[in-house]
Amino acid sequence: MKTAISEQPSADAAGGRAYSSFIDVLRRRAVEHAADPAYIFLPDRAGEPVSLTFAELYGRAQSVAARLSRGGHKGDRAALLFPPGLDFIVAFFGCLLAGVIAVPMMIPRRAGARDASAAILADCRPRFAMTRRDLIAASRPDLAERFRDAALDWVFTDECDAASPQALRPPSADDIAFLQYTSGSTSAPKGVVVSHRNLIANSEMIRMALGNTRRSTHVSWVPLYHDMGLILNALQALYAGAPCVLLAPVGFMQRPLAWLRTIDKYRAEVAGGPNFAFELCVARHRPEEIKDIDLSCWKVAVNGAEPVRAGTIERFVTTFAPYGFDAKTFHPAYGMAEATLLISANSRGAGASTRRVSRAALHRNRIGDPLQPEDGQVLVGCGRALQGERLAIVDPETLLPLGPGSIGEIWVAGPHVACGYWCNPEATEAVFGAGFASGGARDWLRTGDLGFVADDRELYITGRIKDLIIIRGINHYPQDIEETVQDCHPALRRHGGAAFGVPDRSGEEQLIVVQEVVRTFRGEADAGEIVASIREAIAREHDITVREIVLIRTGSLPKTTSGKIQRRLTRHHFLAGTLSRI
């Protein structure tokens, strides 16, 4: 396929001058490194790898853009509904070329009771639905009928023929690149409006924090409809000019060690995921499956998207150090869709920072040293503020900045903070237009997360405001209680529990724990013994009494598409009596 390059590419961002859009980035790659591999997809189990060079990607994206331009207008939305593979990447860049706003979406499950697709379609009202023809014709013919009322124009990327290059107006920095719908861990999903300016700014921040170059091959299994999969992996690799190797998410969940084998095979420098991914690798470790791998090439193991656990880091390092994994490779980070993605991280090779603090002080929103050994709790730092960003810890009630040693809401400002929520001015004003009560610019993003900045400027996350459990005036962080529960008995599944509060008749908050039991333990585990272990552990570690403990089936805990625990939805099911109890 011939690829026409109509404009001179701008200078590399690493050289001091920024791109105006990601189309500028792709054009430069297609000119200077036309035959180099941009993306490689490894099909699950059998099947040959599928790849695209930078020039091939640009050519195919032009064909998709031509099809979109014939059927729509600039600013139209396109829902991207793709199975794992490279067609998502082609469609995404086709949208950018045509000025159509991409809306990455998870393909809804056939019988998904908690499917967010209907809410997303109703919110952004896309003109196009983009996928492969074979998905609709063979594996998921129900999708066309399911979305029939949305009156979508279906565009199949595998049927977009090579087209003559069109004189498409290049996007400007202020044009909307895509809508990233939030995961809905605490509320209904909202469409975060990400401009090209936001995307370029955060991509440069990520490049600097991770130390990426053209040699920084990425390996990722994180879904491309998730911001970590799309921005931190697929787009960051292209921004740095490095190859990106993609695995099917379901393949990783079933065989996580394949991820490590792929890192070794392609000598990847960057590969990461949520904390549970590293825990899963430890749980599924089989020496005979990876006896010959060498992980010394791995330089940046990003751990983010959910609370980072010191125990997970320790277990992973202990398990995989014999295969060349260096503890300093661990790269805890913090981010969210409203800031495009990354908010804080350390430099490459810094490793994870930890701090042992007093649990009692933490309950009072203070940071101090443990008074005795049993009062200690280890927190993992998530790096420092990025270059070009402002970060503050603010009292969420008084809206005044707090000093070191105090826990407050994390506020962020900078060119990477997104434009707001799609067609939701009230929420946009509340979240993206914050300002200090003492005055100053009202350009701060309220993250809704609690944390503190240590004396060395390391940011530590302690929890989410909406998830905080307050019992007798003392703050309890649900993730800490959940970790205590999952450590107390081998039958309890890691990343499979939710702690939350419900009021009793007098209005006093009471603790409820919902926890999955590992499938292999169901026939032999004594439920009474498990419940007693949980009660004892929580009383010992947190000095509170659990009102009720609910043991549920493996895989039935409500989670978002990115694997985050939906505590509020779990609470709803508890109150409605609809949990899948054992």
Image (cartoon, rainbow, N blue to C red):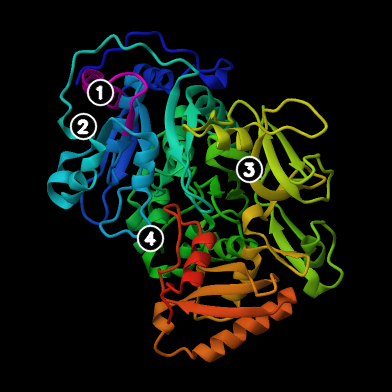
Disc 4: which residue: 253
> Which corner quadrant holds the N terminus?
top left
Q: Is residue 61 magenta?
A: yes
**On screen, 150 above or below 282?**
above
Which amino acid type is shown beneath numbered disc 1? Leu
Name the residue tied to disc 3: 447
Q: Is residue 430 above or below residue 186?
A: above
The kind of secondary structure element at disc 2 is: strand
Q: Where does label 2 land, which residue?
A: 155
- Of residue 419 and residue 315, the one placed in the foreground of this image is 419
Distance from disc 1 to disc 3, alpha carbons, whole Å, reads 35 Å
Badge 1, how many Cα within 10 Å: few under 14, some, many 20+? many
Q: Is residue 453 above or below residue 279?
A: above
Q: Which residues are magenta?
A: 55-78
Q: Is residue 499 left or right of residue 408?
A: left
Which residue is more in the foreground, 414 or 183? 183
Q: Nearer the viewer, mark 4 or mark 3?
A: 3
Q: Are marks 4 and 3 in contact (CB under 8 Å)?
A: no
> According to the image, label 1 marks what residue?
68
> Is residue 496 a member of the stretch shown in magenta?
no
Q: Amino acid at mark 2?
A: Val
